[in-house]
Image (cartoon, coloured by chain):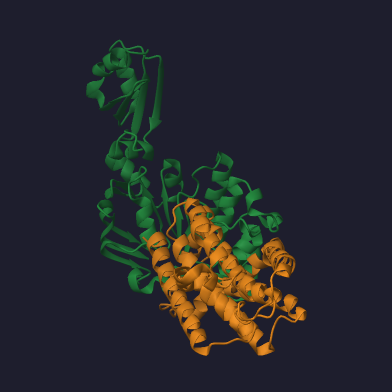
Amino acid sequence: MAADRTAPGPPPGLGARDGITRQLDYWWTLYRRTWRASIISSFVSPLFYVLAMGVLLGGFIDGDPDRLEGATSYLAFVVPGLVAAHAMQTAVAEMTYPVMGMIKWQRVYDSMLATPLRVPDLVGAHLLFVLFRLATTCGVFMLVVAPFGLFATWWGALLAYLGQVLVGMAFAALTYAYSVRQTSEMGFGVYFRLVVFPLFLFSGAFFPVANLGEVGAFVARLTPLWHGVNLSRMFCVDHVDWVLAVVNVAVLGALIVLGHRLAVSGLTKRLVS
Amino acid sequence: MISARGLRKSFGDFEAVRGIDVEVSRGESFGFLGPNGAGKSSTMRMVAAVSPVSGGELRILGLDPATDGPAIRSRLGVCPQEDTLDNELNVFDNLYIYGRYFGLGKAEVRARCEELLEFVQLADKRGAKVEDLSGGMKRRLTIARSLVSSPDLLLLDEPTTGLDPQARHVLWDQLFRLKQAGVTLVLTTHYMDEAEQLCDRLVVMDKGLIVAEGSPLQLIREHSTREVAELRFPVGENEQGAEKVADLGRLEVLPDRVLVYSQDGEEVVAKAHERGLRPVAVLVRRSTLEDVFLALTGRTLVD
């Protein structure tokens, strides 16, 4: 059991990449133990939405491309929006209670910080895990609905998929920044009801935001989810406004950077005091 | 291994550590004693290179925690006050994954985990869920985890708080073996028997300051007497009894008994009898670290 190393010089510093890769085993083990439980929320529930909203409710809606942002059926309209909204929900789910658990309940972060790992390494690895979750969830979702002929082009579907992952990551980073500042899970209830749920309903996933009226549409277009919904839909139905796409990507990218910074600063303040 | 000069830690207006000097050398087993809120844990967190120093100078393994945190932590083992095991993972994975945080190779960590599971007597629990373990087992697993990187310096924050006597003795035995193997141990405790068992040298902290320093024996010599005579009088008569033995040594009058600190406890008892005192019960014992602790930090409850 002895520490038989003879006094070495200072060990080499820890690179950011190294700090993250050292945690891969942790996240992979965790995923292997929990992925079965996530199947329902990841795949089954969204498919129910597609069935109920897209097919059954959508059957009553005329497929007028002029009123449906270029989509030829309500199903083709709603699916890209649903996947983007689902990305948001997946990210929010991963970044609320699990983060609180790692800070406060099981204190996994504390145990990690007793090792060479630093706060940015923890944040980086956790976000990387969510990226993986988003990539798999949205990917499977898109593959499942692909045979229904909803996507105009394969490359459009691919770019839409990247947009969905991007909006998911924006919500992951922002929610992370929020969660590390919560002292109890009470704050999550407020967040779900006042932020996530209204966004889910009114950010253009289910109907064109133009239906909200001028002011309503303006407000809706300011929300992060709308940028993701818009990217996802434009590319899926091949009705692309490239300038707008660049704006969407830039906004989501900026939110990721902002959320990441706030998450690191919040977690540092919380755990390294 | 550790060198602190005028070390301070404050949280806002509150000063948890108010300027302490500490030196710990290689192979030593060093203890921080003190009541709750004395600043032990804050000190430990600074030594663990987790909590930034508010003032003074701190070197751990010759390095500055402000700039070389990861390098320092790569050579430390930390056993926190509360278990921070991952309930989602089984016993083996808790160790294995922790070892990977130190950048150790997979095969190396695996071998190390097997060795440690044997060492802490959890080999038959390797696949068990953490939440199914007893308190003592969790503590042993936490200690095994802190050893997975073969640390030069092991930090233990109240390692046996909340354990039953059997579990404590098993842990002490394991810590003693580590100490014999040359691992430098630094621990905090408020159990005096633990400090006497494990520490070569210790400091007593109170209100953020070091109030005494030395080996357990030195501290007893300096801050207490060789023996203590405990005289128990009938209820309400302790005060009167105490007056009659006041010249025999330092006195402490408690609600249920009178303590007389003296070089020779039997003599105190004999003299008390000569003076016509008839205590209900008498106990002559050696001074312990607990007497020192209470003398230095008082009997008042802190929280």
Task: Say which of B21 and B125 sits in front.
Answer: B125
In the rendering, at what x and y percent does residue B267 appear? 32, 23
Residue A4 visible in the snapshot: no
Residue lying farthest to the right in this orientation: A147
Q: Is residue A4 above or below residue B237?
A: below
Res. A8 image quadrant: bottom left
Q: Nearer the viewer, residue B235 or A143?
A: A143
Q: Which chain is orange?
A: A
Vertical arrangement, residue A158 with respect to residue A126, above or below: below
Relative side of B264 to A224, left or right = left
Which of these two is toward me, B233 or B227?
B233
Q: Quarter of the image for the C terminus of chain A: give it.
A: bottom left
Q: Residue furthest left?
A: B247
**Does the image show residue A60?**
yes
Q: Is residue B252 above or below residue B206?
A: above
Q: Which chain is green?
A: B
Does residue B236 sit above or below B191 in this rendering?
above
Q: Quadrant of residue B29?
A: bottom left
Residue B196 as seen in the image, left or right of residue B248 = right
